[in-house]
Image (tube, coloured by chain):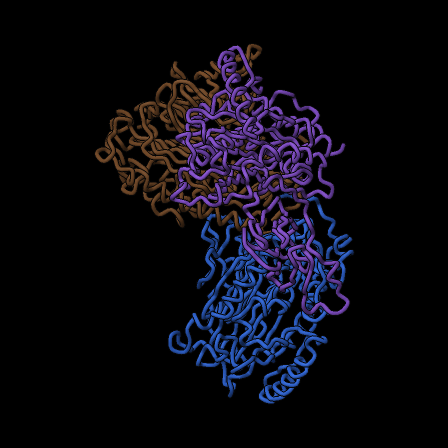
Chain colours: A brown, B blue, C purple
Amino acid sequence: MSQAPVNIRELLDRRKVGYSLEAPFYNSQEVFDADMKHIFGKHWMYVGVEPDVPEAGDYMTVQIGNQPILIIRDDDGEVRAFHNVCRHRGSRVCTHDKGSTGNLVCPYHQWTYNLEGKLLFAEHMGEDFDPSKHRLKPVHLKNVAGLLFICLADNPPEDFQELVDTMTPYIAPHQIANTKIAAQIDIIEEGNWKLTMENNRECYHCTGNHPELTISLYAYSYGFAPSAETDEGMKQYEEMVKERHAKWEACGLPSAEVDCLDTKISGFRTMRMPLDKEGQSQTLSTESACKKLLADFGDAAIGGLSFWTQPNSWHHFMADHIVTFSVIPLSADKTLVRTKWLVNKDAVEGVDYTVENLTAVWNATNSQDRFLVEESHKGSKSPEYQPGPYSPYTETLVEKFSNWYINRMKTLIGD
Amino acid sequence: MSQAPVNIRELLDRRKVGYSLEAPFYNSQEVFDADMKHIFGKHWMYVGVEPDVPEAGDYMTVQIGNQPILIIRDDDGEVRAFHNVCRHRGSRVCTHDKGSTGNLVCPYHQWTYNLEGKLLFAEHMGEDFDPSKHRLKPVHLKNVAGLLFICLADNPPEDFQELVDTMTPYIAPHQIANTKIAAQIDIIEEGNWKLTMENNRECYHCTGNHPELTISLYAYSYGFAPSAETDEGMKQYEEMVKERHAKWEACGLPSAEVDCLDTKISGFRTMRMPLDKEGQSQTLSTESACKKLLADFGDAAIGGLSFWTQPNSWHHFMADHIVTFSVIPLSADKTLVRTKWLVNKDAVEGVDYTVENLTAVWNATNSQDRFLVEESHKGSKSPEYQPGPYSPYTETLVEKFSNWYINRMKTLIGD
Amino acid sequence: MSQAPVNIRELLDRRKVGYSLEAPFYNSQEVFDADMKHIFGKHWMYVGVEPDVPEAGDYMTVQIGNQPILIIRDDDGEVRAFHNVCRHRGSRVCTHDKGSTGNLVCPYHQWTYNLEGKLLFAEHMGEDFDPSKHRLKPVHLKNVAGLLFICLADNPPEDFQELVDTMTPYIAPHQIANTKIAAQIDIIEEGNWKLTMENNRECYHCTGNHPELTISLYAYSYGFAPSAETDEGMKQYEEMVKERHAKWEACGLPSAEVDCLDTKISGFRTMRMPLDKEGQSQTLSTESACKKLLADFGDAAIGGLSFWTQPNSWHHFMADHIVTFSVIPLSADKTLVRTKWLVNKDAVEGVDYTVENLTAVWNATNSQDRFLVEESHKGSKSPEYQPGPYSPYTETLVEKFSNWYINRMKTLIGD
């Protein structure tokens, strides 16, 4: 069903703080186009990890809206990104999800670029042709202790350096460069990407929906603010967190909460949080899923370092494995959620870990979240849907996502 | 292929009486959006039967355009309808086609409503939260002797009460509340909903296309007006109808034709019509498909009571079973036709009836009609299609559908 | 993803000669609609061959955009085309791809037309109805020595007669009317039709992509212009061509190049070209795929007569078989490529030829080209795609296609 044209500026201006967004933010083509232009076109996005391209010449491709992007490790070991578009007649240069190559050879007419994007060879183009004017176009890329972020803008947000500086000491102990991707699973949710993000930003829905995830998760760990109902439990939980943080920080593992989700352009939040029971990993048993740890932590029970970024990622770093999520909008009502599980690159499948056990919790959780996102999307299409109130105790991080989104759009969209 | 924008008011104004509609009425997105807003948004629609929700707590869901609707029987036995949209973050509350429940619990955060739509429980919302402002939004519903109609407008057409008053004595003897749904089959036609309705409103196409249906159908029974060609046959048929009507009405079965298809907002037509051969049922043998009749009619050969409504239904009530059809537009070129076959709720499958025999005629007929609708849709997309003349003898009820549609749109669409 | 509205006139005016087209020509809905209106709506299109409708009453249907077209051989043996739309309520009259019939009977209400499109019979229409005002609407059709072209315009381009006059002596010796269709394969490419055509108009991509096709193809045969790199090889090739042309023309086989690809409204090019090795056919062995030749050529090594037309076809005529291609746009990003292989109608499958051997080269080549078209389409959607330079030596015929397209659009689209 088509929709009346929407006035995005008006929608942004009348957004009611503390309430879910109006329907066009989830459903309209105009808003989706603006999201792709302003949110995904002008911010740093998480797209993969160093182990996606472990060796020189290894590449991966990702598609952001209508933009095919190529990420490749050059001969000096630097990871670079390019627009995956040949300068001759526009063919994609790398056509597979992943691969390894000496030079980048377009399949159409074999125009050949080196790993820095320089055009080395183009047959039949004559003497007037200037190869230096036909390099692959570069894309900004930042490597944050092994997490790869790209930005499609000419001038990326400069405050991303603060994220890099803050997060590097948190993430570095987990040694991403020393891991391999044990599993990657893509799911496509029939819902708007903002519903996927909002779902990620609260655990109000966890008790009723995530029996596997809540085995290791403390009920109060995820963005809960104390209320009359939860006052007692929260106090006990916070005492425990204080004690664990002291212990972990003494071992060189930064743990304290940092939250600038809606106060910076490159908004993020991090915190190392205790896990329940054995306290080792987000698994069904709460014990490590991989015998060979990511590094020499002494004890495997270091909880989970969580890291959330605007607009499109979240990550959990444990002693034994890392699970990392990127969200890529496909259309106003279709969203790709890509999950990667990383383990020590020397771990042996079947000996140190099994993929089934490693992925059990988040596979189940992703599937449950997909259902919730899709049902919200269906409901929010009704003309009778109206924004409802966020819980002041359990949906404060959803509010921060919505705030960030609304403010970024207000700034970028012009009048 | 996209289309030039259409001026609906101009199209309505230049409609030529006695001719099929212009192509944009079947193909354009603008007209489809207007149809959903004005025709399906402001009239009573047939959506199901009492046996869809036989017990307290039983519910069914239907989707009308982008509106998810919930139909549920409350604890007092009353059937109610609601917008199936949680007042928190918009998730659908009931996510299955059918089910049974004590309260209505949203799967997302377990907001809990009672069967009258009152919000009973919402965790973590704090003391300032007022549950009474977050009831499920109701939808108008009318129960016509067991047929369920809803209207999405704030102020539904009032003349529907005349339909209720007129039709109740016709339908009541067939005791819908005492039936069960023996079979339900959904088909999706790749054509505009108006082509589906127009196909239903004439039997000019029956001889050439419906070998199964025409076994029990008298050639002159369906909207035929006498012409030179058919004069003799019509006279004989009308004599027979007169005689049967006298007999059936003496047994308490109203039979006379009532036709206000294009003279009322809630347009409809009804008539009890003789069936050919054994005269009992729309079956391949013309005998009853179910041994246990719907009620104590004395004789099974009471023909078929037909009932047609604008904009979206038709129904045939016989002594042994009822077959009932609802039409729900899915897009400008896709239409859901939902057929339900009802039998006495005490009838035993395999003993009193078989689903195969019960559904044989209308399954075949629906499939044949789907083909005709789809071929008309394909042809009407051609820029060379132009409205052709309706037969003055066999397509008078099609003309009444088109008249009703054009007049309702003219009234509702504004200038 | 939706796109900003495009100004086609501006796009046309700023087209840079010698470069690939700007992205909206491949991606925008507005341009696609204009292509269907002006290019496919006002030029002669190739749609099939005489052996598609060998006998009186044989018909085929084709769909051009939203227009269903019927091509039928009448009782006098003349091939005619009609809009396949009943004049009653718009149903398609012929609903199969191919068939044979005495009269054209609409399936809906059996309105019956003769093979010249005259309405013979329509029941129940009354005395005032005038059948002569309800003939099937004709479509212009030209039969070029067995190749069928249609034009949807009221006034088709008159210069098509020059194509007919020029090409008839080239094609006639291959006796299409004496062939049968040994195989037909439709593929759908996920790309714009202009990318399909551009791909067809150069062999720069052949060496790297078409191992089967290049067995029989001389590297210099396809639109190559001499350059420093290829100078020596080109000279030798041209000597050979001169010698062969003299020989073939002496046998009554016109062979010289005619090229008016971008100088006429009905643009085309033809040339008889030597084939490599055995020189008989575009097969894996370069020998004839069918033992029974199309006619008495004396020697099977008569190379291949190629014939290219704007906007939508190419054809290769050999001694033993003909392979012929039509391109039909389905949407801005979907294109049907229909390939037919013709052999002598008296040839016996399994004895004189096998379908596998006959179709091996072009099946493989089509599949390879589909990949290239689809990758170009993906890349050209990127906002970072920009038109790249055509090779002045190997892409001159692509430039002629683009020139023709741009000039035709400039003339037809108005200001």
Q: Is residue A248 above or below residue A392?
A: above
Relative placement, left or right, of B320 versus B374 is: left
Query: Where residue A362 sits: x, y (%)?
Result: 36, 40
**Quadrant of the rendered image containing residue A19:** top right
**Quadrant of the rendered image containing residue B41:** bottom right
> Which one is nearer the viewer's eye here, B192 or B33?
B192
> Which one is nearer the viewer's eye here, A78 or C76?
C76
Residue A53 is at least partly visible in this image? yes
Quadrant that contains the N terminus of chain B: top right
The structure residue drawn at horizontal position 58% and vertical position 23%, both measured from the top left corner, is: C386
Query: Where residue B175 sits: x, y (%)?
Result: 52, 78
Query: Where residue C45 sits: x, y (%)?
Result: 63, 39
Residue B27 is at least partly visible in this image? no
Relative placement, left or right, of B190 versus B26 is: left
The structure residue drawn at horizontal position 48% and vertical position 57%, both measured from the top left corner, is: B94
Counting every numbered tag in the picture gives: 0
Residue at the outermost left position? A351
Relative placement, left or right, of A384 versus A171 is: right
Q: Is residue A382 above or below residue A313?
A: below
Query: Where residue C326 sits: x, y (%)?
Result: 56, 38
> Which one is nearer the viewer's eye here, C270 or B331?
C270
> Which one is nearer the viewer's eye here, C388 or C209?
C209
